[in-house]
Image: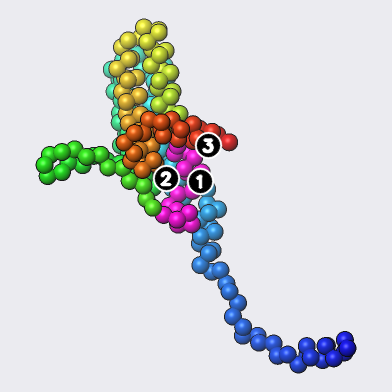
Amino acid sequence: MAIVIAERMKQVPVDDTEDVSLDIGNEEELALRKAKIRHPLATFFHLFFRIGAIVAYLFCDWFSKSFVTCFVTILLLLSFDFWSVKNVTGRLLVGLRWWNQIDEDGKSHWIFEAKKVSHCNSTSTEVEARIFWLGLIICPMIWTVFFFSTLFSLKLKWLALVIAGISLQSANLYGYIHCKTGGQQNVGRTASRFLSQQLFQRTL
């Protein structure tokens, strides 16, 4: 019986030209998934200006005794940070953007957009998203600590600068939370839930 089966197997022709499915199209997709940082320049400047403003606030007195010089330097860093995060890094790192638009009647409209892409065709990586949200959430918290420390130490000349830091960075945080939650009007509870999830997930 075994001899008959062996003879039949020998008679079956083997087609060497049989098509073999090659995942050539998936090679680029796999490479993008493995890539840790696809936008290194945007990632760098997402953190550079905001961390630079914090470092300058803490150590500016070491380099200059002029209050005006320190004030202007930190305010410029905060302004550069606001512009770059709002117009560049949010779009590149997480596919989100927000802006204000005035219609023909002169009414102001806030627009919050999230780019709809599949996971495979995502323009950002998990590492970039983690860096984006951690920088966006933690830095306003640091400026809030500066606010209370400035208030309790009676360094009132720095109070306006600290309030500017909180306002500019919180504005970006609020705008991107609106984008992430779909532009919901009642964003308070959703924002607190989202922030707690981001801090828990990104620090793991």
Q: What distance separates the C-alpha of mark 2 from that of mark 1?
A: 9 Å
Magenta run includes residue 128: yes
Q: Which amino acid does label 1 sit on?
A: Glu
Q: In which quarter of the image is residue 203?
A: top right
Circle 1 residues within 10 Å: few <14, some 14–19, many ≥20: some
Q: Residue under label 1, please give it.
A: 126
Q: Quadrant of residue 59?
A: top left
Report the residue at 21% width, 42% height from top. Answer: 101
- x and y percentages locating residue 73 in the rendered image: 32, 25
Q: What residue type is labelled 3?
A: Arg
Q: What residue type is labelled 2?
A: Leu
Q: Residue under label 3, please give it.
A: 202
Q: What distance separates the C-alpha of mark 1 from that of mark 3?
A: 10 Å
Q: In which quarter of the image is the N terminus?
A: bottom right
Circle 2 residues within 10 Å: few <14, some 14–19, many ≥20: many
Q: Residue under label 2, please give it.
A: 93
Q: Earlier along the polypeptide chain: callout 1 or callout 3?
A: 1
**Left or right, 16 with reference to 11:** left
Q: Is residue 94 visible?
A: yes
- x and y percentages locating residue 142 in the rendered image: 44, 23
- x and y percentages locating residue 4 in the rendered image: 85, 91
Q: Nearer the viewer, residue 141 or 85?
A: 141
Report the residue at 54% width, 63% height from top. Answer: 27
Vertical order, 168 against 145 (above or below): below
